[in-house]
Amino acid sequence: MKRRLFKTRVIVNPASNHGRTRQRWLEIKEALKSFFREFKYEFTERPWQAVELTREALKEGTDLIIGVGGDGTVNEIANGFFENQKIINSEAALGIVPSGTGCDLTRSLNIPRNLKNAVKFISEAPDQPIDVGRVTYTDSEGNVSSRYFLNIADFGLGGEVVRRVNQERLKRKASSYVRCLVEAMLKFKGHEVKISVDGKDLPSNRYLIGAIANGKIFGKGMKIAPEARLEDGLFDIILVKTLSFLEFCLHGWKLINGSHLSYHKVSMERGQRVMVTPLRPEPVLIELDGEQVGSLPALFEIIPRSLPVKGFLKRV
């Protein structure tokens, strides 16, 4: 018997937002029914399953994939749009219903946090082709791996904070990004790295944060790359030199409102291809869209305007 084709597929991470997505699924489903006459939905049960579900749906002819979850869920779905370093269907679009502890990408796309408004937004917003980042890095087993990201990849402090957050979750403790950030800052002194942007070598230095930004915001609201645009074909590379804890307390708030670019320990570059190599043997952790995936050395490359996403690309 021929399988029925659903033009809209909803991929749900029920564990997102500390399990609250599962608890409110009936409410989410009713909101979807208000604006989409027919759709098929599936729950993820393990890491990376959203990649497989997305690829399967696209190969079956699905036009719209709606992700319900946080930045990590959306990252997996975005990776599912690609196979063998090629996009499966350049006409299919991604929609996002924010339902996670971190939904930083949705701010750059101006997606409402309110459930009904977010679903209505997906039904009305145009398809906006946005840039996609691809990073080739060293995974936890020492192998070379690659992965796509939509929002921001970073090395240094971000990877350390995510590692601490994950450790707290494994211990079944309540994880707080801000608390883990402060704890990391008390001990983390940055890493010495070599950076090349589009073949141009930057002076080697010790950096607290190195953000390769496609979007503007990471870390649950920090406007690390206030001038970044999702469709300009360029990364904004934000480099923050090592700060003392006192300096961080005095100036760290600038990362929240995006006024840090004028601080003398912050620099910005723009480019399409960024190579980052550690100068010391200790591991330098990297994270993509809020997920800690591996370590340096890593190559970050941008794929211009390659993924249609439901959104409005206004400055925030």
Image (cartoon, grey):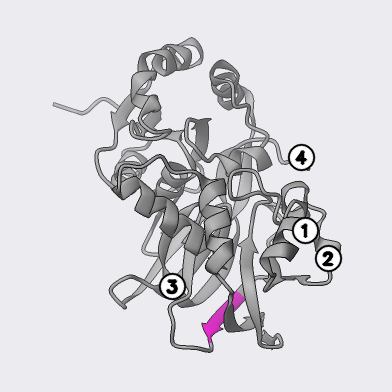
* Residue placed under numbered mark 1 in the picture: 251
**Dot label at residue 295:** 3
Whole-angstrom CA distance, mark 2 to mark 4, is 25 Å
Of all residues, the one furthest to the right in this rendering is 262
Query: Could one spot residue 88 in this view of the protein?
Result: no
**Residues packed near mark 2 inside 10 Å, few (<14), some (14 to 19) or many (20 plus):** few
Of all residues, the one furthest to the left in this rendering is 1
Q: Which badge, 4 or 3, is on the more N-terminal residue?
A: 3
Q: Which badge, 4 or 1, is on the more N-terminal residue?
A: 1
Q: Is residue 42 left or right of residue 270?
A: left
Whole-angstrom CA distance, mark 4 to mark 3, is 33 Å
| Residue at image point 51% right, 52% down | 180
**Dot label at residue 3:** none
**Dot label at residue 263:** 2
* Residue depth check, mark 2 versus mark 4: number of the one nearer the observer: 2
Whole-angstrom CA distance, mark 4 to mark 1, is 27 Å
Q: Is residue 66 left or right of residue 43?
A: right
* Residue placed under numbered mark 4 in the picture: 314
Which region is colored magenta? 274-278
Pick the residue in front: 166 or 310.
166
Q: Are marks 4 and 3 in contact (CB under 8 Å)?
A: no
* Residue depth check, mark 2 versus mark 3: number of the one nearer the observer: 2
Q: x and y percent of residue 15 in the render? A: 34, 34
The amino acid type, in three-letter code, at marker 1 is: His
Q: Is residue 167 left or right of residue 157?
A: left
